[in-house]
Amino acid sequence: MAPNVTNRQRLEFATAGFLAEMRKQWAKLHPEDPCPIKNLADYPENERSALMAGVQKSIQYAGADTDVAFAAWLARREEELPRAS
């Protein structure tokens, strides 16, 4: 029988994976420097909650229910690109 898994546990798992990937990328870019990115459990509770909220929002933005907003974002981005160069 599978354990009772909560959405918060899934979000913790996703956030821990995000931070692990960030540490890996930091090590590639800055091999001589100590990594400022900690394990999720090493952050204070309020910072863990903030990190998890950010990951949750990213997951939501990647969903199909944001297609209209995504299309608008792409259009604005395309308009801004010529001005940036």
Image (spheres, rainbow, N blue to C red):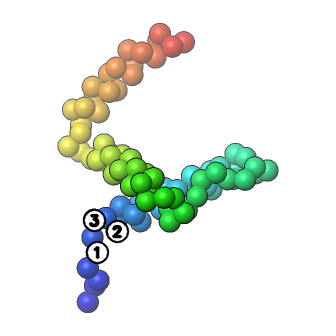
| Quadrant (top left/top right/bottom left/bottom right) for the C terminus | top right
Q: Residue at x 29, y 33 (%)?
A: 70
Image coordinates for residue 20, horizontal then vertical, percent: 55, 60
| Quadrant (top left/top right/bottom left/bottom right) for the N terminus | bottom left
Q: Determine which quarter of the picture holds residue 67.
A: top left
Secondary structure at badge 1 equals: loop
Secondary structure at badge 3 equals: helix
**Alpha-carbon distance for marks 1 and 3?**
7 Å
Q: Determine which quarter of the picture holds residue 68.
A: top left
Q: Is residue 66 left or right of residue 14?
A: left
Query: Mark 1 and 3 residues: CB-CB less than 8 Å, in contact?
Result: no
Q: Is residue 36 above or below residue 66?
A: below
Residue, disc 2 = 9
How many tags in the picture? 3
Residue, disc 3 = 7
Query: Mark 2 and 1 residues: CB-CB less than 8 Å, in contact?
Result: yes
**Alpha-carbon distance for marks 2 and 3?**
5 Å
**Alpha-carbon distance for marks 2 and 1?**
6 Å
Residue, disc 1 = 5
Q: Residue furthest right?
A: 32
Amino acid type, label 1: Val
Frontmost residue, 63 versus 20: 20
Local packing at callout 1 (Cα closer than 10 Å; few below 14, some 14-19, many 20+) is few
Secondary structure at badge 2 equals: helix
Q: Residue at x 23, y 45 (%)?
A: 64
Image coordinates for residue 45, horizontal then vertical, percent: 43, 59
Frontmost residue, 75 versus 53: 53
Image coordinates for residue 22, horizontal then vertical, percent: 57, 52
Image coordinates for residue 69, horizontal then vertical, percent: 25, 32
Q: Residue at x 47, y 12 (%)?
A: 82
Q: Residue at x 34, y 68 (%)?
A: 9
Q: Is residue 67 left or right of residue 29?
A: left
